[in-house]
Amino acid sequence: MLIFLSISIIQGQSPHGSTLKISCDACHTADNWVVKTDSIFFNHDTTRFALEGQHNTIDCRQCHTTLEFSPVETNCVSCHLDVHQQSVGKDCSRCHSSNSWLVNNIAEVHRQISFPLLGAHAVADCSQCHTSETNLRFEPMDDACFSCHQPEYVATTNPDHEQAGYSTNCIECHKIDAFEWTGIGINHDFFPLTQGHAIEDCARCHTSPDYSSISPDCITCHNEDFLATNNPNHQTLHFSPTCTTCHTTQPGWKPAEYNEHDNQYFPIYSGSHNGVWDNCTDCHTDPNNYAEFTCISCHSNPETDNEHNEVAGYSYTNTACLACHPTGSEDGAFDHNNTNFQLTGAHTNVECLSCHANGYAGTPIECVACHMDNFDQTTNPNHITLGVSTDCASCHTTAPDWNPAKFPNHNDFYPLNGAHATIKDQCIACHNGDYNNTPNTCVGCHQSDYNQTTNPSHTALNYSTDCVLCHTETAWTPASNSDHDAQFFPIYSGAHDGVWENCSECHIDQNNFSIYTCITCHANPETNQQHPGVNGYLYENTACLACHPTGNADGAFDHDQSNFPLTGAHTSVDCIQCHATGYEGTPTACDACHLQDFNQATNPNHQSLGLSTDCVVCHTTAPGWNPATFPNHNDFYPLQGAHASIANQCASCHNGNYNNTPNTCAGCHQDDYNQTNDPNHQAAQFPTTCQTCHSENNWSPANWNHDDQYFPIYTGKHKNEWNQCSDCHSNPTNFSVFTCITCHKQGETNDDHDDVNDYQYNSAACLSCHPDGSE
């Protein structure tokens, strides 16, 4: 100190720097420079850092480490280590005081950072949220509930928040100041919990883990109440399960008001009945069945009957009252004649219940709804048999006994044209009172006209009784068989026009006009001479018509211009062989004429082989069915390789016998197998399945699967080390005998096996120890 002071004196300066402007004796005595704490008179409050709390009791040198006092910083972190690692800022005084490091106002501090500690948060340990290895670092956190409470959200099962897709904003359902995860704070405005619904136990309504699956419909929770109610019985009356129709959420279901009664059933809160009743039982006398009601307990007789004089169909019943007075008012009472079903004819005398036995609403207006029995029982005509329309009005009026009746759709059964149309209203003329058995053919009514006709005599000429062939419906004359040209043969046009006078010139049998002749005019030998070289020509009536359907020589039928040209054996066949049943519609399929040939074919047997009956698949029209091909041979036996090259040499394999040709290799190649001696297949007992080694292209090269079945000679160390099978198989008559030691000499082989116990120099030992030929 003396040295220090000496230097200071020499320099003429205070050791405390130039900024400390107090007298030395404020801290020091004249005896020495030692400073005694109790003798210091310096007032620290005059500085910018007043000494408070524990700062009053510490040695000055704990803060002022040099004699020059002024450079000391006044912020906390200049003296105190930041144990929070800059996670809460540098101002320690935000949480701590100079008296102690303990923090007593955590709640107040949290309010300053917009996350007040309420409910369970107020008693939570800081480290529960602010996790760190020292529990002293308080990093800023997301103030969203889910950032801390995700595990609780995921683990929740009643309800399962994840499965239900609930919001992760917890405060939508839970209170932030609560101590438990109750749902008391949930915003239930989507289904207001009022009166009887104001309950705190969610499980009373939410009985399943999935809280969102519950329906807002009353019946979801109150179905048992609905079913158990019997005054009135809601089920029997088919009341709406929408409870709010009549009830509020007030406990006890009362008071209840059925406002829909006026709209759905009958006005009792308005109109004439408003205020004239006290209880439901005034009208609904059976409390167990509100579908029943009465009007006549109030509207009694004889007054009611007297008020309904001259009302057609009036009936003194409850349902009749409601049907005609649906609003309960005398004015505007129901009038049938103002509806779409006016009462006329027999309907004016019918009592209402005859039609409205099942009630008045929805009564059908179709005749058949009431008169189906009449329809079913009608026999003249039988409506069911004829398929007559059930729309009675189409034929009948409402006059009694269904008469008079008309039949406007007569043309649907029998068209009335010409002379028939003029008597359409004279039903008796044709039906004679019997509407079931009236014939619908001309002759059915006009048989007597047919029989009495003499010019010409229809009966003698055996004319058709189908009158329309010659006559119209307008009159019997004029009559014309002009359809002869179109239906049979042109006699009014073409080559035959004008060359005949009487029908008997062609129709020689007056009793059968289906018989005709051409050869009375077209005689021989002229006709034969006119058909030289015509295949299948016949001198007969049917042949004439078949080839000359129009009667002209020009355009006569030419088979070669048809879809069946005559070729091969067909050119020499008489027409009648194919056209025995006529010329029109003769089939062109081979089997139509040749099915018997097909069935009798034995080499091969076409039936047993299931060959196609389409002969042209294999045959031409050449006589004797030869030559023949078999293009679908592959469907029975595929011809490949060398077999394909002899596909047209059938005799090579079949030898004229097409039924018993074998389909195995050995069946044809047994001689090749027997004669093979390199190697000898028989001696080696090779299989007769040739395809095991050979392909269908040629016998060689052949591939014997020696590697997989016996010993690898095409792979491994023996590949390319041999030339002939006899290199190893020394006995050409027995390929089961083999040798290894012709190549593997004893001297070298012995040397290679010096250390091999029980070694033997023989072929069997070689194979036993080296099955794949590898060392």
Image (tube, rainbow, N blue to C red):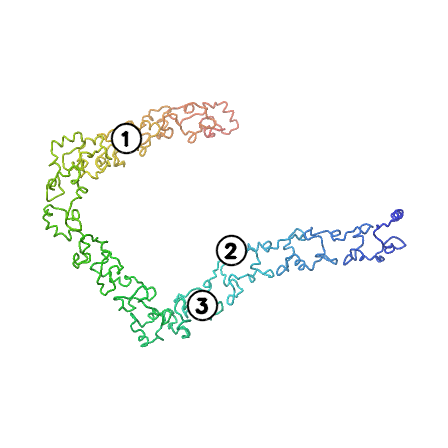
- The residue tagged with tag 2: helix, strand or loop? helix
* Residue 213 placement (x, y as % from top left): 48, 58
User: Residue tagged by mark 1?
Assistant: 629
What crowding class fits label 3: few (fewer than 14 Cα within 10 Å), some (14-19), or many (20 or more)? some
**Comes first in the chain, label 2 or label 1:** 2
User: Residue tagged by mark 2?
Assistant: 164
**What amino acid is found at the position of numbered circle 3 in the picture?**
Cys
**What amino acid is found at the position of numbered circle 1 in the picture?**
Thr
What crowding class fits label 1: few (fewer than 14 Cα within 10 Å), some (14-19), or many (20 or more)? some
Disc sitting over residue 246 in the figure: 3
- The residue tagged with tag 3: helix, strand or loop? loop
Q: Is residue 461 left or right of residue 159?
A: left
**Comes first in the chain, label 1 or label 3:** 3
* Residue 96 placement (x, y as % from top left): 72, 57
Tell me whether the residue at label 3 lies in contact with that at label 2, contact meaning CB atoms closer than 8 angstroms.
no
Q: Is residue 755 left or right of residue 696?
A: right
Q: Is residue 723 left or right of residue 417?
A: right
Residue 707: image quadrant is top left
- The residue tagged with tag 1: helix, strand or loop? loop
Disc sitting over residue 611 in the figure: none
User: Which residue appears at 56% of the width and 59% of the height?
Assistant: 172
**What amino acid is found at the position of numbered circle 2 in the picture?**
Ala
Cα distance, mark 1 to mark 3?
93 Å
What crowding class fits label 2: few (fewer than 14 Cα within 10 Å), some (14-19), or many (20 or more)? few
